[in-house]
Amino acid sequence: MSNRNITHLSIIMDGNGRWANQQSMPRAFGHRAGIKSINTIVKACTSRQIDELTLFAFSSENWNRPEYEVKFLLTLFEESINQYIDELRQNNVKVKFIGDLDAFNHQLINSINNAEKVTSNNTGLKLNFAINYGGQWEIINAFNRYLLSNPSPQKITIEEFEKNLSLNTNKPDLLVRTGGEQRLSNFMLWQHAYTELYF
């Protein structure tokens, strides 16, 4: 698949902690390196005129990690949003977060809301972060949203269902997973139905 055919790229950001362990460094070192790599990825997508980038940064299963690591990741998310949002705004990047955001503390939610607000009028790269996200959760959530707006449904169509997804845009053309694992890990199961996979 050539660059000109990719309009939407999705990436499972995996293996940062394992990479740090291999360098005899704490896992936190790997997570910080992963955050820094986002800047490189965004610039690469912009230069290649890719319209949309969706990053799987924190799955709903990540809550099962040690408490100290989860706490560090959430703090890192908040710090990174506040650190990079002005640069993203100036570079015409439009930011969106998808997932069950209600599980996060007020400070992180405020940072998320602010990031989406200050970039809402940008017309360049669409940058989506999937946090506390699971593909099965999204399918159930979309169906429940449909039921709430259609109290007496007779039959649901694919088009009607997709209107209720967290991310109802062009489906990804290419999914890249770093870290060596070869599975979707419950990431955008509906949207990746026909996506090319690169591990």
Image (cartoon, rainbow, N blue to C red):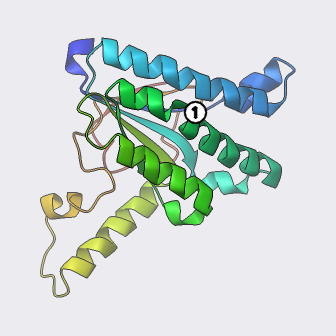
Q: Which residue corresponds to mark 1?
A: 83
The image quadrant where one finds the N terminus is top left
80 or 190, nearer to the observer:
80
Helix, strand or loop status at disc 1: helix
Is residue 20 placed above or below 68 in the rendered structure?
above
Horizontal placement of 156 versus 78: left or right?
left
Q: Quadrant of residue 164?
A: bottom left
For the point 66% across and 48% down, which residue is it?
A: 74
Q: Is residue 70 visible?
A: yes
Q: Residue at x 61, y 45 (%)?
A: 78
> Would residue 196 appear left or right of 85 to someone viewing this image?
left
Q: Does any portion of residue 96 appear in the rendered image?
A: no
Residue at image coords 28%, 22%: 50
State the residue lying farthest toward the bottom: 152
- The x, y position of residue 84, in whole percent, is 52, 31
Residue 57 place in picture, x, y as percent: 55, 40
Q: Position of residue 21 (x, y in %)?
A: 81, 25
Q: Nearer the viewer, residue 126 or 91?
A: 91
Residue type at mark 1? Gln
Report whether 107 appears left or right of 17: left
Position in image of residue 88 (x %, y %): 42, 29
